[in-house]
Image (cartoon, helix red, strand yellow):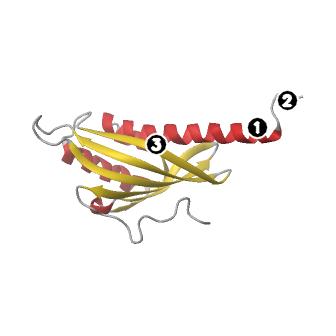
Amino acid sequence: MSEFSPEETRRLRRLLDEDDIRRLAMFYSHFQDHGWVDRLREVFTDDIECEFGPYGHWKGIDEVIKNFHGVKKNLGDAPFCAMHANTFHWIEFIDSSEAVGRRQLLDFLLTRQPDEQPLLWLGIYEDRYRKEHGRWRISHMRLEFLWPERHTSEGFPKPFPPSS
């Protein structure tokens, strides 16, 4: 007989999936900050779609990787020229292979002088996650920019979690 009830087993599965998704979001930020842009292929689905306000709307893994290389070059093209701190990650499951998440971004530009404001952006990520071949990946990412300039999508903030 199992030590866990069926409900506890279901909850444990969700906790494991939440941990996998949180690690995915952590890797996304670390890979950018380290300058390991090509490793973002480990984070995104092949059909990834990114909506990044002033940075554009990117579709497909090849375009996303190319554009992240461009952003990295524009920010200084060195490891840790920027730091992407994410916090308050809220995850809701649609079913066993799809989930949505919302997390807050504090984006620091570390190439600025000590007497300059290092904070580049404050924003909200809204992600869609998909489990493929037993692994979670980000399939859609929207970044709502809140400060110092506001670049938000129509109707932001939308209800979360979104209704199906």
Q: Residues within 10 Å of mark 3 (few under 14, many from 20)?
A: some
Q: Position of residue 79 (x, y in %)?
A: 26, 33
The answer to whether 120 appears left or right of 38 in the picture is left
- Dot 1, crowdedness within 10 Å: few (<14), some or many (≥20)? few
Whether residue 92 is visible here, answered yes or no, is yes
Along the polypeptide, which appears first: circle 3 or circle 2? 2
SS under mark 3: helix
Judge left or right: residue 77 versus residue 50.
Answer: left
State the CA–CA distance, disc 2 to disc 1. Answer: 9 Å
Using the image, tell me which numbered label, if any, was put on residue 25: 3
Disc 2 residue crowd, few under 14, some 14–19, many 20+, Cα 10 Å:
few
Of the image marks 1 and 3, the number of the one nearer the N terminus: 1
Of callouts 2 and 1, which one flags the residue occurring earlier in the amino acid sequence? 2
Contact (Cβ within 8 Å) of mark 1 with mark 3: no
Residue 16: image x %, image y %?
Answer: 63, 37
Q: Is residue 141 left or right of residue 146?
A: right
Amino acid carrying mark 2 in the image: Ser
Residue nearest the observer in this picture, 123 or 140:
123
Give residue 9's mark.
1
Judge whether residue 35 can be spotted in this image: no
Q: Vertically, is 76 above or below 50?
A: above
Vertical relation: 83 (above or below) 62: above
Residue under the image location 16 percent in, 43 percent down: 117
Residue 2: assigned label = 2
Three-letter residue code for mark 3: Ala
